[in-house]
Amino acid sequence: MAANKQQGSYFGLFLVGLTVLCAGFAYFDSATGKALLVLGALGVIGSLFGYMGIKSLEGMTAMKPGSGGMKLVGAAVALLGWLLTLAGIHITDSAGGRIVFALLGIAVSLVGILYILPAAFNKNALWKGESASQRSGMTAAKTTMEHSR
Amino acid sequence: MKTILRNRLLSLCILAVGLSLGTAAYAQTAAPAAETPAPVATAPLSALELKAAAAKAPTKDDLAKGDPGGTITGTISDVPVSDATSGLTLGDVANQVGQNKIGINFTWTLLCGFLVMFMQAGFAMVESGLCRVKNANHTYMMNFFVYTAGLFAYWLIGFAIQMGGAAGNSNLGGLQPLSSEYTISLFGKTWGLFGQNGMLLTGHTYDVGVMVIFLFEMVFMDTALTIVTGACAERWKFLTFAVTSVIMGALTYPLFGNWAWGAGWLSQLGSNLGLGKGYCDFAGSGVVHSVGGLTALAVCMIVGPRIGKFNRDGSSNPIIGHDISAVLIGCFILAFGWFGFNPGSTLGASANGNLRIGSVAVDTMLAGCTGTLGAMLYMWMFKGKPDASMTCNGMLAGLVAITAPSGFVNPVNSCIIGLIAGVLVCLSVSFLENVLKVDDPVGAISVHGAGGLWGVLSVGLFADGTSNYGGSWNGVTGSVTGLFYGDAGQLAAQLIGISTLIGFVFTFSFVINLVLEYFIGHRVSIETEVAGLDIPEMGQLGYPEFVFRPEPVYSGD
């Protein structure tokens, strides 16, 4: 689909909605502020659904559906590492103990980011299957990329 | 009697000048109290002394002859008089001293901010140069528009979240309008979560000092945003880039920025728990570069590798950029801009400790130098060629790494930090590409993510305890001191910061962009990607008179 007028319009709506939303936050104490907040939120949400409505027009992308559950697990493990670090701050009073907990937390987060998430994304990666050019019926000579293969 | 009067006048003079200078405190230091206006002595300063000084001042006729030596320009005649009937008073002189201090700091901070703003041009050249010619316009345009998108979002709400509770900076006049931090009480301590003043810069935040800090912090934020554009270049839908940049400028960056710089909980680790001086990040290895690098990693995973980057067996193909000259020049522009980034982070040149700007600048320079050496020698020794793009990345990694410790370390340590960063970036690029299968066309994740985290860590190791920005940092008396100089608590604070970056910032960015993937989709279509993004996404080629020719197959060792 590439860039088009609809995209531009919905992005415009998103910006206007966000501006009104923030104005609502800034003047939240007044009735006008609350009204602006609701109006702005509607604008932002409207733009999101607008984006979703035209998403299917994009056409085939060089991505295959990955493992959605594993992606969330990876993110959750990354977050868990941080929570572990925070817990460590209050479990021990010594600097050494807090360093150990922080290192443990970092290690857990890294497992989520460097092990679980890449595995989730690469499980069905397009490059593992047939080439993209074959899928889209394009000739290799058209692109510099294909020549480098 | 006359002597007593004279002594009292002298005491008043010293008191007024001293108070007007105030206690020096660094921007990110939560100073105990804001500077109060200097008490103004209303009585004329020993009229005789003033008259004597005025009599010695050059006349209009003297000035009309020209002042090639600069010896008679700028005298007592240039001090503005508040009340013409009473003439020049001690109050006038003291106020002028105070205003001079603030004026110097405003000028310094603004000029450094302008330098950082110019770094956008460097980023644009580096990123576009490392992309293929068919995506040049798209990549340049992303780097151009990210400035606007980020600025707009930051003005709307981002600045308020980050700096809305950051009052107390005497370098910039106190910044008292920014005095509302949302806090929670946990385990008997109060922790800052986000600021609340300054949305749209209205109300009390329509203030000269606030404007200065807004500009300076804004250009930092924009630097973080532009890191993502490089990592996701050549396949990122412009619409999704625009939306996610707005969100990052409004939420992701400001939140961590508040925790580190805006009186948030990370900066309070020292005052609340006794961990060194709290999380210390002088100019933003963590706040700017790690946030940008980790967000880039999150988006890069979601958007996936470029077509043709990986083969079926998982091996990778090099995809060569189109303009190495742009990369090298862009890198130099960035190195130049970094002199605004790091020395500018004193937020002043006139107050206790701020004369360390020279040391900060030299540390910056040296780390960039050794980063370059580290990367170039690594590539030359282990890959056979002094690779230009990796050498550039080495310089940038050295600069990124020294950003956090530049205010706290000595030149030798800055060389070590830069050298390690230069080697680290080479290893990180290889790890991302060959192990994780993450396609980062410009190496942004390694330069800013890995380099930034290393920089944050290095504060906890190398800070030598000699810096003294007004005697305290983050509200804790003393100088920032790392593990190698005796303070393990500082290392703990830095590690907690790193854990927050990896565990919270990455996850936050990842979830936001996963939601955007659901609503908008990050990736362009196969047809668009193969044809190049310039025409489908931007409607115009970057170089319309260029003829596309097949690239030679790289057959290096």
Image (cartoon, rainbow, N blue to C red):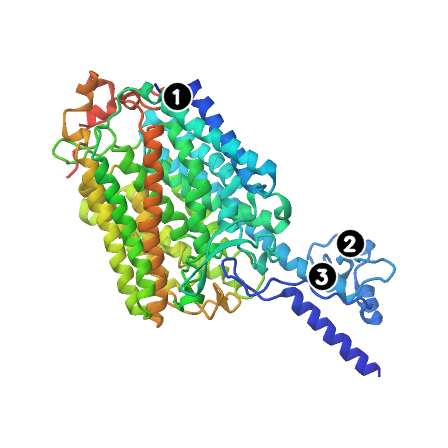
Please, what is the three-letter code of the amino acid marked with disc 1? Ala
> Which mark's residue is nearer the viewer, 3 or 2?
3
Please, what is the three-letter code of the amino acid marked with disc 2? Leu
Secondary structure under badge 2? helix
User: Rounded to the nearest whole Å, what is the CA distance between mark 3 and mark 2?
Assistant: 25 Å
Q: Residue at x 23, y 53 (%)?
A: A108
Dividing the picture into quadrants, the one containing residue B121 is: top left
Crowding around mark 2 (Cα neighbors within 10 Å: few <14, some 14 to 19, many 20+) is: few
Please, what is the three-letter code of the amino acid marked with disc 3? Asn
The quadrant of the picture occupied by the N terminus of chain B is bottom right
- Read off the residue under disc 1: A3
- Read off the residue under disc 3: B95
Q: Nearer the viewer, residue B495 or B515?
A: B515
The chain to which mark 1 is attached is A
Crowding around mark 1 (Cα neighbors within 10 Å: few <14, some 14 to 19, many 20+) is: some
- Read off the residue under disc 2: B63
- Residue A40 appears left or right of B3: left
- Residue B30 appears left or right of B255: right
Q: Nearer the viewer, residue B319 or B264?
A: B264
Q: Residue at x 37, y 47 (%)?
A: B291
Q: Residue at x 79, y 62 (%)?
A: B57
Secondary structure under badge 3? helix
Q: Earlier in the sequence, mark 3 or mark 2?
A: 2
**Rendered location of residue A53, percent (x, y):** 37, 21
> Which mark's residue is nearer the viewer, 3 or 1?
1
**Rendered location of residue B385, percent (x, y):** 22, 43
> Which mark's residue is nearer the viewer, 1 or 2?
1
Q: Give above or below for B73 relative to B299.
A: below
